[in-house]
Image (cartoon, grey):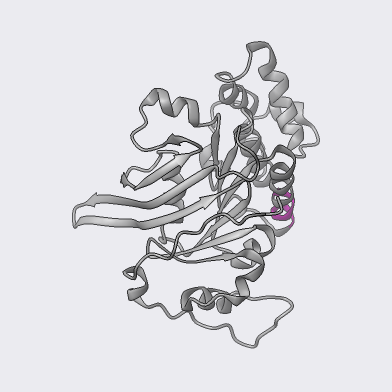
Amino acid sequence: MQEKSGIILDVEDLNIRFDTPKGEFHAVKDVSFRMRREKLAIVGESGSGKTQTGRAILGLTQGRISAKRLAFHDTSLLGLDAAGWRQIRGRRIAMVMQDPKYSLNPVMTIGDQLIEAGQRSLAPGSVRSRALEMLEAVKIRDPLRVFNAWPHELSGGMGQRAMIAMMLMAEPELLIADEPTSALDVTVRLQVLAILDDLVKTRDMGLIFISHDLNLVRTFCDRVLIMYGGRVVETRMARDLRAATHPYTQGLLACSPEIDRPTRRLATLQRDPAWAEAPAAAPGAAPADTGS
């Protein structure tokens, strides 16, 4: 395993294209970034390409992927065969989908699904105890009850915690979380964020946090990539997000209500189609010290 300061993911000029009845659709355009064991946010409106970028890292997109470089440590993720992906998916890189209602298998208990997620990388005799340990790690008070429960018996917050526990079964180095809190109420959202933050710090993981909420990532993440029309238009340290210079980022911030900055009327986001066709933003290298 590389040192904490080392680059774990290197993406250069990532492009994703889909063939449609109306012709080719260029969904992700020349996206470049590098990351260490940090909390990296990818932010943008629906359709900006942030989820497709996350899926491409795990080879889960249905589109055609091309890139100058797409590497996890020294392993190229371009053109991996099925055996190669089995060594990466779930073991070294895992992904938490947006809504547990559609991600958990409704005809399997939570325990069976956790065991299935860990059986390839753990000794047979340790999988059950590992599953209970992971349920406890995501702050589930009664792990055995949830282990034996069916997905429909869990609340949204509990289901999301079970999904996170499932993705942690093999102790991945990189976790991709696709809007993991969008379907949760405010209280449960804060609890899930606290769990993710604790996991990154205690397990020395990298986290890609896909979201549309700039105010949330500004306080939770280390660094932010802002996407529009498939491109990264700006890269900022999260703490400096209010100093953003791109008009799209400024517009998103102006449209977001803030308790400490009340306004009588929220701004309306003005979009310029040229932003989606402009040259890609400079690649966002991971900072020298992320503090994670």
Above or below, comparing residue 169 to residue 122 in the picture? below
Q: Residue at x 49, y 32 (%)?
A: 89
Main secondary structure along the magenta-highlighted residues: helix
Task: Quadrant for residue 227, please give it.
Answer: bottom left
Indicate the quadrant containing the N terminus: top left, top right, bottom left or bottom right: top right
**Which residue is nearer to you in this view: 110 or 121?**
121
- State the image coordinates of residue 130 (x, y, percent, origin top left): 70, 23
Q: Is residue 225 magenta?
A: no
276 over 37 or under it: above or below: below
Residue 277, quarter of picture: bottom left
Residue at 48% from the left image edge and 26% from the top image edge: 87
Judge left or right: residue 30 versus residue 260: left
Foreground residue, 166 or 284? Answer: 284
The one nearer the camera, 80 or 118, is 80
Residue at the (71%, 31%) spot, across then down: 134
Q: Is residue 43 left or right of residue 146?
A: left
Is residue 183 among what the camera can see? no
User: Does residue 259 show up?
Assistant: yes
Q: Which residues are magenta?
A: 187-192
